Image: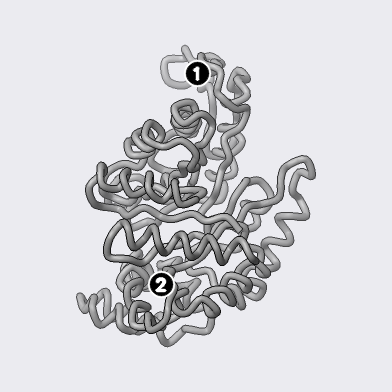
Amino acid sequence: MKISTQLGYSGNFLETVREVQELEKAGLDLAWVAEAYGFDAVSLMGYLAAKTTTVRIASGILPIYTRTPTLLAMTAAGVDALSGGRAVLGLGASGPQVIEGFHGIEYDAPVTRTREIIEICRQVWKRDRLEFKGKKYKMPLGPDEGLGLGKPLKMILPPVRDEVPIAIAALGEKSVEMTAELADGWLPVFYYAEKVKDRWGAALAAGRAKRDPNRAPLEVFAGSAVAIGEGLEPMRDIGRPMAALYIGGMGARGKNFYNDVFASYGYEAEAKEIQDLYLDGKKQEAAMAVPKSFMVGPEGFVKDRLTALKESGVTTLNAALVGNTIEERVQTLDKLRNIAEKI
């Protein structure tokens, strides 16, 4: 099983890059660069490309509404060229709170938009003259639209690869089905190995049934906070504030995709309590209401959880490495790598 990690929304870019360099030496396979409503992800991805040599560099994620499909393709091709073919284009719909609130763009048709973006990106990377007529995107505009001067164009520079892998952060059944059909990777949130079949099994099966047999199997990136050792159980609280942010704060009552997923695992009462507390401004209380279910404990416990994840279909563990310093997080990765290699 491969290992990836999600870089934080905030912090010192230079310090973040130094940590990725150390994690790369310890065997990290992939680093996800987040983009919410802080700094953009692409700036850090480009800097990481210049300062690393083997780790794959993924956007985790770029919201589909904030860039045109062709710019997404150009951006991924650019990072891929800078990194020597190590880029992954991670895409997601984000949520209406961020898209309509921070970007001022209508949040509509996320599955249709994602499907069309995947097709457009792959056309751009193959350097076809881009002609596309979809439900949401049209290139070029017709002679009676705009100034009437649009014409089919192709990317000027040849990309390093004919395709940059595309990973989709999908939660809804239709979105997961589309991901299993078209994408190269799936980045779910709050992944619970024992509940995946019940929650997403039908959608994954339907998508895979339509998948191009010439395309490689779908990569699945999932996991949790990780700390390995005896007497570390209290550290399971570390991941609670971030979980509470998504379950409670990333959306509104009745319109929070993360809350819906968490509730579907059998945590209906907890999901409601966390959301109520968070939206009432009681963030600490909301965090403490998140159940302790992170991968923190003795080596045997972590090995059992890794085995369950692998058996459920996870190909890359997306690990939030627990530690107070870079050195401690590197040590956690060393231990995790040794366990993962034996599974």
Q: Looking at the picture, does residue 152 appear above or below residue 66? A: above
| Amino acid type, callout 2 | Gly
Mark 1: amino acid: Asp
Q: Observer-nearest residue: 282 or 140? A: 282
Quarter of the figure that contains the C terminus: bottom right
Q: Is residue 223 above or below residue 215?
A: below
Q: Residues within 10 Å of mark 2 (few under 14, many from 20)?
A: few
Residue at x 66% of width, y 52% of height: 218
Q: Earlier in the sequence, mark 1 or mark 2?
A: 1
Q: Residue at x 63, y 24 (%)?
A: 126
Instruction: Give 253 or 71, whichever is nearer the viewer.
Output: 71
Say which residue appears at 34% left-offset and 74% top-offset: 240
Q: Where on the picture, by quarter, is residue 209?
A: bottom right
Percent across and percent down for residue 94 are 41, 54
Q: Gap in Å between the C-alphas at discs 1 and 2?
A: 42 Å
Q: Find numbered disc 2 in the image and state the secondary structure of the residue it sits on.
A: loop
> According to the image, label 2 marks what residue?
254
Q: Where residue 144 is drawn, which disc sits there?
A: 1
Element at badge 1?
Answer: loop
Residue neighbourhood size for the residue with mark 1, other residues' Cα within 10 Å, grouped as few (<14), some (14–19), many (≥20): few
Q: Residue 273 at what x, y percent from top left? A: 34, 84
Using the image, determine if residue 20 lies above or below residue 259: above
Query: Residue drawn at (71%, 50%), measured in percent from left and top?
Result: 217
Relative to 202, 230 lies left or right: left
